[in-house]
Amino acid sequence: MKKISLRGIFLAFILVLSSGVAQAAPGVSNFVMDARTGEVLYARSADTRLAPASLTKMMTLYLAFVELEAGRMSLNQRIRISANAAAEPASKLGLRRGSRIQLVYLIRAAAIKSANDAATAIGEAISGSEAEFARYMTRTARAMGMKNTQFRNANGLTQRGHYSTARDMALLGQRLFYDFPQYYNLFSRRTANAGIATVRHTNRRFLDAYEGADGIKTGFTNAAGYNLAASARRGRQRIIAVMFGGTSTAQRNARVAALLDLGFSRAPARAEIRPLPRLHLSPDRSIVVAQTNRSGVVPRANRAPRRIETVAVLMARNVEQAVQAAAVEAAIRAANSGPPVSPGPKFIQPASTELALIARPVRRPAFGGSVPLAPVEPLEIAPAPIRQTAINSASGNYGVQVGALRNRGLAERLLIEVALLDIDSFGDADRSITPEAVQGVTMYMARFVGMSAASAERACSRLQARQNDCSVIAPPS
């Protein structure tokens, strides 16, 4: 039988008592999640459809980050402010009709000040109109598994048919953290320059008062009450708690603090992060979600071309098999790229073009099974070293260093483990092991190279979000 700590029982008792008081205001719901695994740690009326208020802006910002990552928009892009955006009520930045302002300032204002005019301007810039953007928001919510959410605007102002739930907003908060760790620090900044004004965080009291709190979003309207989606980290634990329907800022903050305490008391100290399914989003195209079948293979329709050298590695049952497969693939590359050697080993050729296709990696692994892999015949092919690629080449490539180890084999293993952890970031990079003398000791630098500056920064941010060390290696100037 699973042991329950006295602290956990006490916190649960406090929550039950406090919920009785909070229920005096209609429309109260709570939800607590282990952000690493998605495990539900506490729920009360978590699927009740309620007004989300400015928690809506979490989706607006998520889709802005999608545009930035896809290269369809840039932070320095100047956005023209429409009459519709300029007319939004407070809280607002004070944008004027016909003016232009950089997207980075709109993002800061929406995230930190919860500016309604900035959120509307972002939505209109992405989809052409706020109504069309709201439909895009709802389609994205469905793809994320937010089953009880429907958006009618980009900012969360009260509107008929605009609703969400505590559970759904927790799912969205989890997405913001794990899909865009490079932008997540925005939600914990106390102040920021928003171009025409310096904005202050609407939730700075909670961020300052609760240990480990680093986001995410507050919301208030008369119809919604005081809402809060909060995330906090302690050690390797990360908890997301959402409350709808608070009666005041102080009452909301106290209850969310209790919810987070309960989450930390119930969540395991260590847990394997279960990455989420990859979303392929575009405002003017249908949304594709890369899902797995029971065998863990992504359907062919969702596959994208990948270099053949990653296929067997991704299909390996375990790290040891992946390392062996990588050595085989390296030997195949060496044989196919160099002059024929005779006599020599017989190199295996792909049986069909099927091997040249690899699914866009799914971030949430399938449960209860592993992917079959055809046996590798190591005796036929002498293991070859992973290709050495100069980080400071004339092409000016960037790289990500994930470790420095005394043993080359361990360095190879580390590269494979990291590649399997986030093949989205490293599937198109070259693996490089470079020996360097450090205080008279030979160390093997495990790096992914051949990356752009943006992709290297993004990849390292994703690793750091998973509590993995890394550093971006820039080419010499």
Image (cartoon, rainbow, N blue to C red):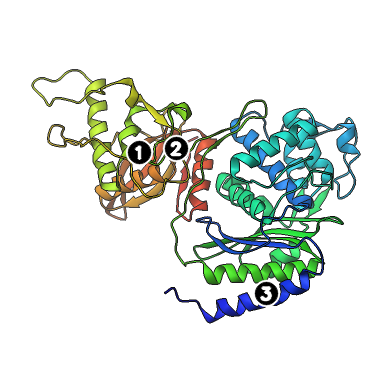
Residue type at mark 3? Val
Mark 3 Cα-neighbour bin, 10 Å: few <14, some 14–19, many ≥20: few
Residue type at mark 1? Leu
Residue hosting label 2? 361
Residue 19: which numbered mark, if any? none
Residue 327, how many percent across, how many down? 24, 37
- Left or right of 167: which side holds 155? right
Instruction: Tell me whether circle 2 and circle 1 mark residues in contact (CB < 8 Å).
Output: yes
- Left or right of 5: which side holds 327? left
Residues 244 and 218: in front is 244
Mark 1 Cα-neighbour bin, 10 Å: few <14, some 14–19, many ≥20: many
Residue 210 in view: no
- Which secondary structure, mark 2? loop
Residues 417 and 104: in front is 417
Residue 16: which numbered mark, if any? 3
Residues 46 and 240: in front is 46
Residue 447, how many percent across, how many down? 38, 42
Residue hosting label 1? 314
